[in-house]
Image (cartoon, helix red, strand yellow):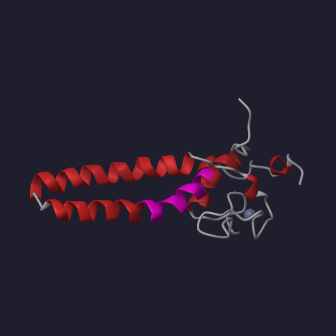
Amino acid sequence: MDKTENNNYSREAYTMMSSIIRGLKRTCPHCGQGHIFKGYLKLSDHCSNCHAPTGEIRADDLPPYLTILLVGHLVVPSLLFVEVVYHPELWVQMTIWPALTLILTLSILPFIKGAAIGLMWHLKLKGDEQH
Ligand SMILES: [Zn+2]
């Protein structure tokens, strides 16, 4: 495959935000119709609708970083609020919060990865750029 193939798709018909939102829906950031995932986090080589080469984009650590940032900002204030207001038993705290953190992380990560792929698609980044 040509390494510049993803640069041949014009991004002028849509904005960066629409590309991110399409990715957030786990659909192709170019056409918004096709699916870009063939598994939980595994990208298809091409969009199932327009054949845009979204599979060559490597988001690396951005989706986990953003997911940890988001989940941490949801769970930690909630944990502190519940501790200060309700004073539950320690075993209750040690049961609820790790489970909630795990569930939220695994639920949000695929959508954040889609959004990261959408952003990288719009910026014509593949994740193999040299600095
Ligand atoms: Zn597409």
Quick one: 73 or 60, which is closer to the camera? 60
Residue 57 is one of the magenta-drawn residues = no
Residue 54 location, quadrant: bottom right
Residue 89: give x, y in percent of width and height. 12, 62
**Vertical placement of 59 versus 55: above or below?**
above
Name the image quarter holding the N terminus: bottom right
Residue at the image point whose x is 18% and y is 52% from the top:
81
Left or right of 120? Residue 81 is left
Q: Main secondary structure of the magenta part?
A: helix
Residue 115 is one of the magenta-drawn residues = yes
Residue at the image point whose x is 74% and y is 58% from the top:
55
Quick one: 11 or 80, which is closer to the camera? 80
Name the image quarter holding the C terminus: top right
Residue 20: give x, y in percent of width and height. 60, 53
Residue 105 location, quadrant: bottom left
**Vertical placement of 4 versus 25: above or below?**
above
Which contiguous range is marked in magenta? 105-116
- Extreme right residue here? 2
Looking at the rendered structure, the number of numbered marks drawn on it comes to: 0
Left or right of 59? Residue 106 is left
Quadrant for ligand 1?
bottom right
Residue 88: give x, y in percent of width and height. 12, 61
Left or right of 25? Residue 11 is right
Residue at the image point whose x is 57% and y is 46% from the top:
61
Residue at the image point whose x is 81% and y is 64% from the top:
51
Residue 99: give x, y in percent of width and height. 33, 65
